[in-house]
Amino acid sequence: MNILSSVVKYKCPRCREGELYKAPFKMSNPLDMHERCSVCGQRTEPEPGFYYGAMFLSYIVTGFLYLSIIGFCIMVLKWSVNQSFLLLLAFVALTYFKTARLSRSLWIHVVVKYDPNARNKPLTN
């Protein structure tokens, strides 16, 4: 499994086999993660406040995406600013948790390096 597939499927960055998030998705706790990978033992929160970096990634990516949506609606579709923002609000409401989960997955994949032999040598710390 390559890194992009691992990020999108919310797999452990170290072994790319274990799940990052508890299943199934629950609205009561949408960012509920396992404490450790069930395959290699990698901690999903290596240190307190680890996912603050994910917040910045999410802000950058969604900022450009949202500006693109508004620009497309106004310049190509000739919608008003109000109509464009109504569409954007609906889009944000539908994709908020997906974006938050994806940015966390991307952040841990940036920090934790892949080890193809991780299954054979689980972490104990």
Image: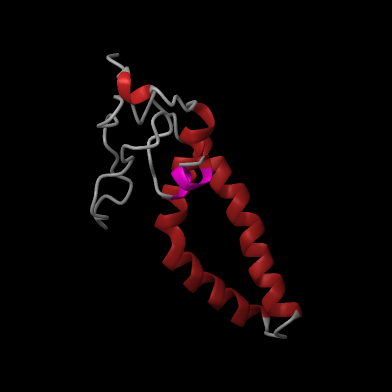
Quadrant placement of the C terminus: top left
In the image, residue 48 above or below residue 109: above
The answer to whether one can see residue 26 in this image is yes
Relative image position of residue 120 (x, y in whole percent)? 31, 20
Quadrant placement of the N terminus: top left
In the image, residue 76 above or below residue 44: below
Residue at x 57% of width, y 41% of height: 56
Q: Is residue 110 magenta?
A: no
Residue at x 49% of width, y 45% of height: 103
Q: Is residue 8 left or right of residue 74?
A: left
Q: Is residue 71 left or right of residue 101?
A: right
In the image, residue 47 above or below residue 13: above
Residue at x 47% of width, y 28% of height: 114
The residue range painted magenta reads 4-8
Residue lying at the far right of the rendered structure: 75
In the image, residue 91 above or below residue 54: below
Pick whichever, 95 or 2, lies toward us.
2
Residue at x 50% of width, y 41% of height: 2
